[in-house]
Image (tube, rainbow, N blue to C red):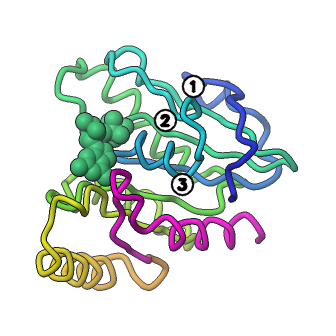
């Protein structure tokens, strides 16, 4: 597994606090409650790795984990949190947009969406910031256990088409369930390839 040796490294409040952009990093983003922490924990197979407090003040950090060999996993703050003051939201949108568009060592973005509410305006905003870099995006449609088989297929196809039509070919998408451990191999394969490049 890709994340077997993940260790927490640093939480940054500003771009200037980030470690040097050496090696390879993969970032996870998603709006609050989409299931990002659960997905990270499932992939990490390491219960405490992606521990993120639900307190608004504490989720406003870029969390760096080191996987060894100059490989890093980055947990981006849950965005769109309704209770966050506008000034703080603006600050984080500024930091996130610059991180996604400028970070040299960033190899790919995993965007976590609740399969029942995919492609929120904020998901689209993240794609608008990141996709011009030409780097790959992998979308996890989480909580797929909450959909019937038929609904899952319809959602997958619909989201895949919208992503392709609007943001191009560098985006892959899959169903994922942390609860049922569905889609873990598929996600690990994508991440494994990104970490090799
Ligand atoms: P985050 O805010 O994006 O980090 O979301 P969390 O990982 O904390 O999950 C938010 C809520 O969704 C929690 O109540 C989780 O138990 C639930 N959840 C997360 N993943 C799944 C899943 O795959 N299936 C189901 N049924 N619930 C999930």
> Which structural element holds mark 2?
helix
Quadrant of the displayed image that contains ligand 1: top left
Label 3 sits on residue: 101
Classify 10 Å Cα crowding around label 3: few (below 14), some (14-19), many (20 and above).
some
Classify 10 Å Cα crowding around label 1: few (below 14), some (14-19), many (20 and above).
some
At horizontal 49% and vertical 49% (from top left) the residue drawn is 42
> Which structural element holds mark 3?
helix
**CA gap, disc 3 and disc 1:** 15 Å
- The magenta span reads 172-197
Q: Which residue is nearer to you in this view: 3 or 19? A: 3
Q: Is 179 inside the magenta-drawn segment? A: yes
At horizontal 72% and vertical 33% (from top left) the residue drawn is 7
What percent of the width, then of the height, locates residue 196? Answer: 77, 69
What is the quadrant of the C terminus in the image?
A: bottom right
What percent of the width, then of the height, locates residue 121? Answer: 19, 54
**CA gap, disc 2 and disc 1:** 7 Å
At horizontal 50% and vertical 25% (from top left) the residue drawn is 61
Task: Name the N-terminal-most of marks 2 and 1.
Answer: 1
Image side of residue 163 versus residue 104, left or right: left
The response on whether ligand 1 sits within 8 Å of label 1 is no
Quarter of the image for residue 9 reads top right
Q: Which residue is nearer to you in this view: 47 or 76? A: 47
Classify 10 Å Cα crowding around label 2: few (below 14), some (14-19), many (20 and above).
some
Label 1 sits on residue: 14
Quarter of the image for residue 156 reads bottom left
């Amino acid at each position: 597994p890709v994340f077997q040796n993940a260790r927490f490294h640093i939480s940054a409040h500003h771009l200037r606090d980030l470690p040097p952009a050496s090696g390879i990093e993969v970032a996870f983003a998603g709006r609050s409650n989409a299931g990002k922490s659960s997905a990270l924990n499932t992939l990490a197979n390491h219960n405490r790795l992606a521990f993120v407090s639900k307190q608004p003040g504490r989720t406003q950090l870029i969390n760096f984990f080191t996987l060894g060999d100059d490989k890093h996993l980055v947990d981006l703050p849950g965005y769109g949190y309704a209770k966050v003051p506008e000034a703080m939201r603006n600050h984080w949108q500024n930091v996130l947009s610059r991180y996604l568009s400028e970070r040299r060592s960033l190899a790919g973005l995993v965007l976590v969406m609740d399969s029942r509410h995919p492609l929120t305006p904020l998901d689209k905003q993240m794609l608008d910031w990141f996709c011009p870099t030409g780097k790959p995006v992998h979308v996890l449609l989480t909580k797929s256990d909450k959909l019937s088989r038929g609904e899952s297929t319809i959602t997958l196809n619909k989201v895949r088409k919208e992503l392709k039509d609007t943001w191009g070919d560098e985006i892959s998408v899959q169903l994922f369930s942390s609860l049922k451990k569905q889609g873990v191999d598929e996600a690990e394969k994508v991440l494994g390839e990104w970490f090799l490049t």
